[in-house]
Amino acid sequence: MTLLRSIFLRREAGILVMIVIFCAVVGLYKPQFLTGQSLRIVLLLTPLIMIGAMAQMLVLIARHVDLSIGSMLGFSAMVVGLMYREYPDIYWLLGFPVAILTGAVLGLGNGLLVTLFRLPSIIVTLGTLSLYRGLTFIISDARQINRSVIPTELKVMSRTSPIFDVPWIILIAFAIALMTFVIARHTQLGRQTYALGSNPEAAPLRGIDVTKVTLIVFTLAGALSGLAGILYASRWGFVNPSNTGAGFEFQVIAAVVIGGVSINGGVGTVMGTVLGVLLLGCVAAALPLLGIPGSTQNAIYGAVILIALLIDRSVRQRGAISMSRTTS
Amino acid sequence: MTDASTTQTRKLAPARPTWHVVLVRPETMTFFLLIFGLVGASYLSPFFLDMNYILRSFTLTAEMSIVALVLTMVVISGEIDLSPAANMALSACIFAWVQDAGVPMPLSVIVGLLAGLAMGALNAFMSIRMQLPSIIVTIGTLIFFRGLAQVLAGDRSIRVPDSFIGINTVMVVGIPLPVVIFFIVAIILGLVLGATVIGRQIYQIGTNQEAALHAGINAKRIKVGLFLVLGLVSAAAGMMAASRLGSVRYDLVLGGELQMVLMAMLGGTYIFGGRGTILGTFLAAWLLVIASTGMTVANLLPAIQLTVLGILLIVAIIATNFIYARTQR
């Protein structure tokens, strides 16, 4: 098999083609879509989803799913917001470890429920979705954290840039993608996650500590959601107990499924997920330009998930060449 | 399922005593929780001894409870559907939109029902015909249906005509109509599941689809049928909610899938299929009403109720799994 052929057989090539076609079609109607400015808009829409998608990707590869990501994001953002409100003089960077730790604890909670009681992760995280959201209301007394409370240094992070005019928030997102890439490809944990998802029965026979891997994956997902939480506060400048992170899990699942991560576990790459996120970003950026109201966004996300599922199935049926390659 | 079962088959385990069979069941747990909840709630407020008060409270969740009954059968057959709440919203929006555009009322109702049926068909196509896991498929359709409702209704709320409003105020021998419908649906589905061939086949499919196929059961057809019925009933429930509320918004019963799944789980339906009863879901629906009105009477914030619902779901599934693990021979 030639190199070119093996590249084209990969799932990522399909998404890339979809992005190119989509941008070309939109660019035909609205030439201003194909400028650096709109690339900036696309990139600014994606950092949170990118980080959430990395979390969800790891969980899906382990043949689980985490529906509570949005609620963990909201809770962590609220904890940080409350910290800034109660201790206005606190060093602002402290928000990052606090948010990440908070998320990690919530994620560990999911992981413990799944492993200790051998429960299906989808039901557990459906429960914690509302549990964590309710806790967010309780700790915040159902009040919003206002713009004035969030430190200015944190807020400007989503606009200022250390290099090449690329805002911090985008750099962080890509750094997380790179980190996930290294974890997935080059660590024992990553390989074990793939093995666990490919065949949960065989994994313990190969000496994989299933409980440990599952716990770490869920905790990692929580920690990343926590990071997305503080970046939410940075990007939007407020934290609202009911809005922050609501429905986020669905956008994330959409991105990940489009990116070719299999819902049956064991399959998925960071590259594909990044492209899936970018495709969603392109769609979201193109809608207002084309004069399509923002209310259609959810319907389009839903349709895109269903189409991606069908594509995923047809790829699997075509001999699964590309699938086995994407994991190695 | 467990490797312990293979070693145990050599020596036949003694039959479980009758009291054990009757008492160690998830439904029994639900029933005692219900009694416990009633007693506790009546300490909080004497209103709870007033049957009318409970019945009135029940009308608030009657629509979802009806859907949960059908969802129970879907879960027993080994599938799941997270989209009925979104289906309710979209059917209600289509119904309200169509009749707002001047279509006569009976025709609008039919359009709404057909829309629900079509949504059920989409779920069935994706998860049965294309053999994709229904849990992910219905997350996709959940977003899709809710998104379409948002496209259709936008941010406004569509009013329904006065003649259509007030299903919850219609009384049948002193019981609100939605509650009567809930009773009727529960009895019909209970009979179908417990006393017909199709009912037995649903259990068989959920227990072991492979074996069911060898036994000559057309599993696909039954599952497709269940998804279609669920779509149709969700649409009817959506329009009942429209009648109760007097107007339709795209966020009708937003997040209702949690409560529906919770009712099924709390009633002892086994998440992996093959076990569960309509009676369990029936009791669980009442339990939830008692719990949520109890919390309202006790002046708990709605947010705390959200927390309690989440905890209940997790506890319910742990308890059911535990009971089934103990009684599995």
Image (cartoon, coloured by chain):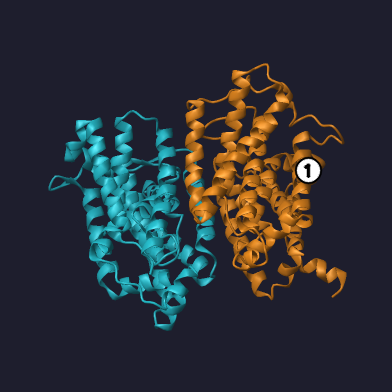
Chain colours: A orange, B cyan
Which x, y percent locates residue B127?
50, 66
Q: Is residue B118 above or below residue A116?
A: below
Q: Is residue A179 above or below residue A325?
A: above
Residue reaching furthest to the top: A89
Q: Residue at x 39, y 56 (%)?
A: B320
Residue B201 visible (yes or no): yes
Of B277 and B122, the residue lying toward us: B277
Which x, y percent locates residue B280?
30, 56
Which x, y percent locates residue B144?
52, 53
Q: Quadrant of the C terminus of chain B?
A: bottom left
Q: Amino acid at mark 1?
A: Ala
* Quadrant of the rendered image containing residue A60: bottom right
Residue reaching furthest to the left: B173
Residue B7 horizontal side relative to residue B243, left or right? right
Which x, y percent locates residue A83?
61, 24
The number of discs equals 1
Residue B236 horizontal side relative to residue A315, left or right? left
Residue A108 horizontal side relative to residue B68, left or right? right
Mark 1 crowdedness (10 Å alpha carbons): few <14, some 14-19, many ≥20: few
Q: Residue at x 72, y 56 (%)?
A: A190
Of A119 and A263, the residue lying toward us: A119
Residue A98 horizontal side relative to residue B226, left or right? right
Question: Secondary structure under badge 1?
Answer: helix
Q: Residue at x 67, y 37 (%)?
A: A227
Q: Residue at x 51, y 27 (%)?
A: A140
Q: Which residue is mark 1?
A: A175
* Quadrant of the rendered image containing residue A32: top right
